[in-house]
Each structure stands twice: as structure tokens, then as C-alpha cells.
Image (cartoon, grey):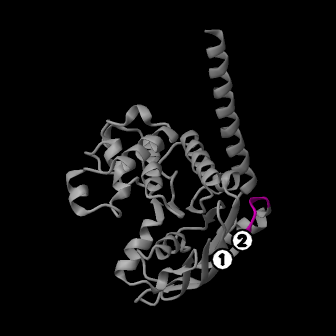
Amino acid sequence: MLRIDALTKTYKTGDRALSDVSFDLPKGQVVGLIGPSGAGKSTLIRCINRLVEPTSGKILLNDIDVTALGSGDLRRARRRIGMIFQEYALVERLTVMENVLSGRLGYVPFWRSFTRRFPGADIARAYRLLDRVGLSAHVDKRADALSGGQRQRVGIARALEQEPELLLIDEPTASLDPRTSRQIMRLIVEICREDGLPAIINIHDVLLAQQFADRIIGLQAGRVVFDGPPTELTEDVLTTIYGAEDWTAMRKGAADDAQDEADARADADRLLEAL
């Protein structure tokens, strides 16, 4: 379980990015973190793994106070927190397999990582994960030869290679087309449910968050202004988080996109049956 208790972040300029943020995240739950630009979503994610140092408050991961850890213990704690990035953060010249195995760098001696000689168990796990994310046919491809959706799948496999206890996911669909975005979100949610992994997804697409997340947390100016199930994310709540918008028209457009995808899958199935 992850517990955030009164987390606050104030920068040296005096700007307050987070104000008294508190919530619990149980095993297997996927939270969609939404809010306008500058609301503090990315800051919150980076405070949890202390890429950004919080000003006050506590972050407890399975009863370990991450905010109180020294540098050595923090490095070990970060092994337990998988991070999936918007821009994939892959090493372009390395293969898919090598990028996935980089998820084990916190566990192996320097000489093994430098010579890329990973233990057999790590390699076997990487093969299983690549099969799980649908990339078993691309093991030896360089990362720069992949599509955006394939790169994000590599990023997911790399995070899982860490054997994490928590996933932090920063706008995983921002660079993807609508259909691929839904595929990636579906994959993340399925993995979290199967493995009992809690996850926080910083996501700019409200409708995707409603479709796939178990719970929505809405930030406005660094404060939690909504915390509840997607079904309670009404137009009034969305207006509180983002300001006035034609939410009905946005939902209709998303529904049309989903129907187009369903029709395309049905057409493909009919073609396969005809062969």
C-alpha cells in the first residue's frame, strides 16, 4: 500500500506546487491523476520517488517512510517503484531486450551492467515480460525502429522487470493516437489487476481516465479537489477541476472514436472468418 500524508511542495521562488495532499492507494488499484497544466500532477509523481524533494509530509510505501530515507536506502527503495515515462526514455541504439534489462540495473553489480551480462533469471523474466506486452517478435530490434505504441510497451516491460511494488506512470498516451492510447491503457490496467500492483497514472485525457481507472483524483492548484470513482466525475466536478467546457460534446466525440475502433475490430474479424 502507498500512503501519502499531508504532502506539500514549495519551491524556492515561493510557488507552492502541492498543498497538504493526502490519500491511500491499496494493492491493485489504478488511480487516474487529472487536472489542468500546472496543477501539480507531475510534481506529485516525482515527489513519491523523490526525484523532487517534498517540503513536508510523508510518503509511506508498505510502511517504509520514503521521505526519511538516506541516499543508499533511497536507491534501494526506488527499485520498488517502477516508472513509465511519456517520452518512453529508451536508449535508442540499444535493442528491445537490452532496454528491458536496464530495469535490473539497480540490482546487479556495475561490471554486469557495463558488460551487459545479466543473470539468466533476469533474461528469462525479460522474455516473459516481452511476450506479455506483445513484443516477443521484436526482441532484437533497436528501440529507434519501433512505433510509439511499441516503445511504450517496452517501457512497461522495463518497469515490470524491476519487480516493483508501485507503478508511477507519467502521461503514457500523450504521444499516441487514440486507438493505441486505449490499447496501452488497457494493457496497464490488466497488468495491475493481475499482479495486484497499485498505480498512479498522470493523464491529461479525462475520458481515458474515466474509461480505465478504478479511481480518479483531481488536482487544482496543488490541492485535491476530487477523489472518487469515475462515475462521480460529473460535469460540475470537471468544471471545478478545469473550468467551464462543453463536456457533453467531448464525451460524444470519445464515444464515436470508441465505436469506430469496435467497428474496425469487427471488420477485421469478419475478414479473418472469410479467409
Which amino acid does the dot numbered 1 rest on? Phe
Residue 23 numbered tag: 1
The picture places residue 213, in percent across and down from the top left corner, at: 67, 57
Q: What span is in magenta?
A: 227-231
Up the image or down, 145 lies above or below 170; here it is above
Q: Nearer the viewer, residue 191 or 250?
A: 191
Q: Is residue 182 left or right of residue 128?
A: right
Q: Of helix, strand and loop, which one carries label 1?
A: strand
Q: Nearer the viewer, residue 234 or 193?
A: 193
User: Which quadrant of the view contains residue 62?
Assistant: bottom right
| Residue that appears at 79% across and 63% down | 232
Marks 1/2: CA distance? 9 Å
Q: Quadrant of the C terminus?
A: top right
**Is the N terminus in the top left, top right, bottom left or bottom right quadrant?**
bottom right
**Residue situated in front as seen by the camera: 110 or 4:** 110
Q: Please tell me whether residue 43 belongs to the stretch shown in magenta.
A: no
Residue located beneath label 2 in the image: 227
Point 40% across, 77% down: residue: 74
Check whether the beta carbons of the residues at disc 1 and disc 2 lie within 8 A of each other.
yes
Q: Would residue 149 be visible to someone looking at this image? A: no
Secondary structure of the residue carrying numbered label 2: strand
Q: Position of residue 77 (x, y in %)?
A: 44, 73
* Closer to us: 258 or 65: 65
Q: Position of residue 153 (x, y in %)?
A: 47, 45
Q: Residue at x 48, y 38 (%)?
A: 131
At label 2, the amino acid type is Asp
